[in-house]
Image (cartoon, rainbow, N blue to C red):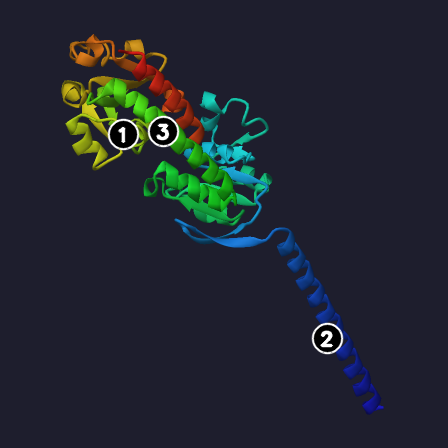
């Protein structure tokens, strides 16, 4: 009797092991099927090596400057920061896209993203990783051309990125020769009004700097070159020091209430050669801080038109 019971127990154990093995095999096969449908690859981000999907379908972008790069690559994000909707150059490109911020974790989870793109300084990265693979970039680590290639690689749109770079290089070559014939050795400054002076920009912080100084290779005043372009993205300058940073031409980023700003109403500003010679061009604050391919392309057209029709 005891032997029969042991035999039955042995038989039951064998059945359980077999069922468990089959179940595990089925689970493994299902996982492999998912991987085949949505394969991953290791992407070297600034927050480490991240396994990201080969063909992401729902991308949440939490850093505004990267939105235009993805749009240029033909990617339609499911959510972006609210500020991106204010760029008129993106008109019609963000229909159906949600406005979201990195601290709205529940809203992001409801979107069920398969990829999240953020800035390295975002304090929510660790929490976001629990929602979907989160790739963080250090904005200051790459110029705009390198950003395009990095994002193209991330979303597997390398050919599209290379195509834009080739088209941009051709546009730069044509326009650089045209503008330099008009401008010669004259200098250009880029400024944004503040409460007590101006921010002066170099070639790394939008406001047309990438176009003016990098692409068209136009000259900056000596102090702009030495104190800003060679050192920092931008520098705040008080009203009394503006003449030292003012070029023969000035691009000024302004808001709707610019006429009430003390800078433009000051005697110092009115006595600048660029102001007297009607060589001050205005930048729309809604687009000035962007330096993505879509915005840069539009800014190039504006800047070339300004500088070639101002003589």
Residue 300 occupies which quadrant of the picture?
top left
Q: CA distance from mark 3 to mark 2?
A: 68 Å
Residue 84 on image: x %, y %: 46, 28
Residue 64 on image: x %, y %: 43, 33
| Tag 3–tag 1 contact (CB < 8 Å) | no
Mark count: 3
**Dot in front, 3 or 2:** 3
157 sits left or right of 307 in the view: right
243 sits left or right of 59 in the view: left
Q: Compared with residue 143, is residue 287 higher up or lower down, i.e. above or below?
A: above
In this view of the protein, can residue 225 be seen by the observer?
yes
Q: Quadrant of the C terminus?
A: top left
247 sits left or right of 178 in the view: left
Residue 275 on image: x %, y %: 22, 11
Look at mark 2 in the image and give the residue it sits on: 17
Of residue 145 and residue 109, the one placed in the foreground of this image is 145
Of residue 211 and residue 140, the one placed in the foreground of this image is 211
Q: Earlier in the sequence, mark 3 or mark 2?
A: 2
Look at mark 3 in the image and give the residue it sits on: 172
Badge 3 marks a residue whose secondary structure is helix
**Dot in front, 2 or 1:** 1
Q: Earlier in the sequence, mark 2 or mark 1?
A: 2
Determine the residue positioned at 23% across, 36% down. Answer: 232
Look at mark 1 in the image and give the residue it sits on: 217
- Mark 1 neighbour class, 10 Å CA radius: few under 14, some 14 to 19, many 20 or more: some
Q: Compared with residue 261, is residue 210 higher up or lower down, i.e. above or below?
A: below
Q: Earlier in the sequence, mark 3 or mark 1?
A: 3
| Tag 2–tag 1 contact (CB < 8 Å) | no
């Amino acid at each position: 009797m005891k032997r029969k019971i042991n035999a039955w127990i042995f038989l039951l154990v064998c059945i359980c092991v077999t069922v468990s093995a089959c179940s595990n095999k089925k689970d493994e096969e299902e996982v492999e099927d998912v991987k085949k449908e949505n394969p991953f690859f290791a992407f070297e981000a600034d927050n480490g090596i991240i396994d990201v999907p080969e063909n992401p379908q729902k991308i949440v972008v939490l850093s505004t400057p990267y939105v235009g790069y993805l749009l240029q690559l033909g990617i339609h994000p499911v959510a972006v920061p609210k500020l991106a909707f204010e760029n008129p150059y993106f008109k019609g490109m963000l229909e159906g896209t949600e406005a979201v911020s990195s601290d709205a974790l529940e809203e992001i989870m409801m979107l069920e993203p398969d990829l999240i793109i953020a800035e390295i300084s975002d304090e929510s990265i660790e929490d976001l990783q629990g929602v979907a693979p989160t790739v963080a970039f250090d904005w200051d680590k790459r110029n705009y051309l390198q950003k395009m290639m990095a994002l193209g690689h991330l979303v597997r749109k390398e050919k599209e990125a290379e195509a834009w770079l080739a088209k941009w290089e051709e546009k730069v070559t044509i326009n650089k020769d045209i503008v330099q014939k008009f401008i010669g050795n004259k200098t250009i400054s880029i400024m944004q009004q503040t409460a007590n002076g101006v921010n002066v920009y170099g070639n790394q912080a939008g406001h047309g700097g990438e176009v003016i100084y990098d692409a068209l290779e136009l000259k900056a005043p000596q102090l702009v070159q030495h104190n800003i372009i060679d050192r920092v993205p931008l520098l705040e300058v008080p009203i009394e020091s503006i003449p030292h940073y003012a070029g023969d031409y000035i691009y000024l980023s302004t808001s709707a209430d610019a006429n009430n700003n003390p800078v433009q109403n000051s005697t110092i500003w009115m006595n600048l050669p660029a102001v007297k010679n009607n060589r001050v061009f205005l930048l729309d604050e809604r687009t000035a801080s962007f330096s993505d391919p879509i915005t840069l392309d539009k800014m190039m057209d504006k800047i070339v038109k300004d500088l070639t029709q101002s003589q």
